[in-house]
Image (tube, helix red, strand yellow):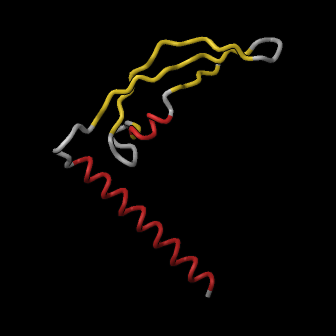
């Protein structure tokens, strides 16, 4: 009985996720009222390990990345809400 409830819950969650993704895709595909993509400048820095075990940080040139206004990634671009939360990118050497 418990396995049947777990199975139905899992299937329901998968169907719900598919519906949300489909709605997100359709809103991106047929959006007319505002810009779909945005260019965001991200700050990068190099993390250079030292012999004494410490790490030295050096600035790297900023990078312009294109993002999409949606919940999920589309067209090979990250969603803007995710990119705005990760504006600083560490590059390990």
Q: Quadrant of residue 74?
A: top left
- The quadrant of the rendering that contains the C terminus is top right
Q: Quadrant of residue 2?
A: bottom right
21 horizontally vs 61: left or right = left
Q: Residue at x 83, y 13 (%)?
A: 52
As drawn, which residue projects farthest toward the bottom? 1
Q: What is the count of numbered marks? A: 0
- The quadrant of the rendering that contains the N terminus is bottom right
Foreground of the two, 43 or 25: 43
Q: List x then y, in percent, for residue 18.
A: 39, 62
Q: Residue at x 53, y 26 (%)?
A: 88
50 horizontally vs 83: left or right = right
7 horizontally vs 16: left or right = right
Q: List x then y, in percent, for residue 23.
A: 30, 58
Q: List x then y, in percent, for residue 37.
A: 28, 35
Residue 80, above or below 3: above
Q: List x then y, in percent, for residue 81.
A: 42, 40
Q: Residue at x 48, y 72 (%)?
A: 11
Q: Quadrant of residue 15?
A: bottom left
Residue 24, above or below 61: below
Foreground of the two, 75 or 37: 37
Residue 82, above or below 60: below
Foreground of the two, 23 or 4: 23
As drawn, which residue projects farthest toward the right? 52
């Amino acid at each position: 009985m418990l396995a049947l409830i777990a199975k139905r819950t899992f299937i329901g969650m998968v169907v719900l996720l598919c519906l949300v993704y489909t709605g997100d895709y359709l809103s991106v595909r047929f959006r007319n009222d505002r810009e779909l993509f945005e260019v965001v400048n991200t700050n990068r820095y190099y993390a250079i390990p030292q012999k004494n075990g410490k790490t030295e940080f050096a600035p790297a040139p900023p990078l312009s990345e294109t993002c999409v206004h949606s919940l999920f990634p589309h067209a090979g671009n990250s969603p803007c809400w995710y990119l705005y939360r990760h504006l600083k990118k560490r590059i390990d050497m």
